[in-house]
Image: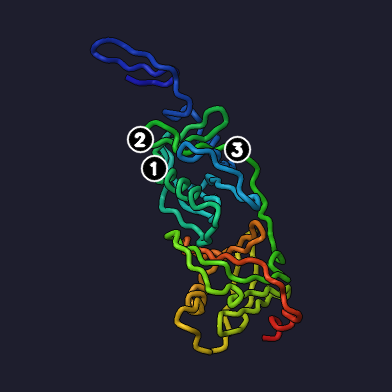
Amino acid sequence: MVWFSNVVVTLSMGTIAFPALAGIGGTTPQADLIDVHWRAVELSGMAVPALPDKREAYLVFGSDGRLSGSDGCNRVTGTYKLKGDAVTFGQMASTQMACIDTPEIERRFHGALKGTGHWRIEGGRLQFYGATGKPLAVFEKGPRPVPVAKPSALGGTAWQLVKFQGSDKKAITPDDGSKYTLDFASDGRVAVRLDCNRGSATWKATASDQLELGPLALTRAKCPKESLHDHIVKAWAFIRSFQIKDGHLFLSLMANGGTYEFEPRSQPKGASQIAAGS
């Protein structure tokens, strides 16, 4: 027999008593879990570092069985079911930004949700457990973060290409980065040079690191075979986020499709007018 003021196991050879396990067997009220902002502080045994732009990996359990949160980069939503200390997560949906500084955190976050079968709250901390008996994730209570908008972070900046870093860690570098440039005007237009072609598009920063780029309008010259023109044109519609780090601009594709790295360049006179009038 088993109960939980103390755990008592009756065997044919006698009785063995173990200390009580807080949170196991339903001793933690489910109400303590609900509508709390749970910030991840440990994933797969590793501490979660502070993230830029006040981003966090976190979860909020709704009273309606819905789950929301973030994996440190993308917003996540889904469902969950509780039965005592057991928890089951339904299929999770997420946005499709790519962040250059969180792939490992994202992987550990989703891995923890997938492997979790039980939960408990101990010392004010929410802990997820799988089959091993070791915590897969540890969360602390925290205030709900306020998104930091950057509506004009790119306005008035000019960049030239350094490289493209694929999700397979392979880098593609141009023969001359000054052939691939972006000039962001403050009025929401971006002037573009892609090797032998020039053009423009619209841009809009919708949140702390989300970026919306409109369709490219380009001239139609045929660039050399080794040009990165076609590579960038094909990827343009899939750019979802940006980050300015150590003076460089990083444009990341959706679903961890890779990242373009740019360095600053001297903005030519009249760049804003060119972008606005293209």
Residue 35 visible? The answer is no
Percent x, y of residue 100 = 54, 57
**Nearer-the-camera pick, 172 or 255:** 172
Question: Disc 3 and disc 2: Cα gap in Å?
Answer: 25 Å
Q: Which residue is mark 1?
A: 115
Amino acid type of the residue tagged 1 in the rendering = Gly
Snapshot quadrant of residue 150: bottom right
Left or right of 185 in this view: 104: left
Left or right of 1 in this view: 105: right
**Nearer-the-camera pick, 52 or 72:** 52
Q: How is the image coloured?
A: rainbow
Question: With respect to residue 276, does 251 lie above or below?
Answer: above
Q: Which residue is mark 2?
A: 131
- List the single residue furthest toward the front: 175
Residue in view at x 42 percent, y 60 percent: 168
**Nearer-the-camera pick, 8 or 151:** 151
Question: With respect to residue 4, does 107 lie above or below?
Answer: below
Amino acid type of the residue tagged 3 in the rendering = Lys
Percent x, y of residue 141 = 60, 38
The first of marks 3 and 1 along the sequence is 1
Are the residues tagged 3 and 2 within 8 Å (C-beta)? no
Is the C terminus in the top left, top right, bottom left or bottom right quadrant? bottom right
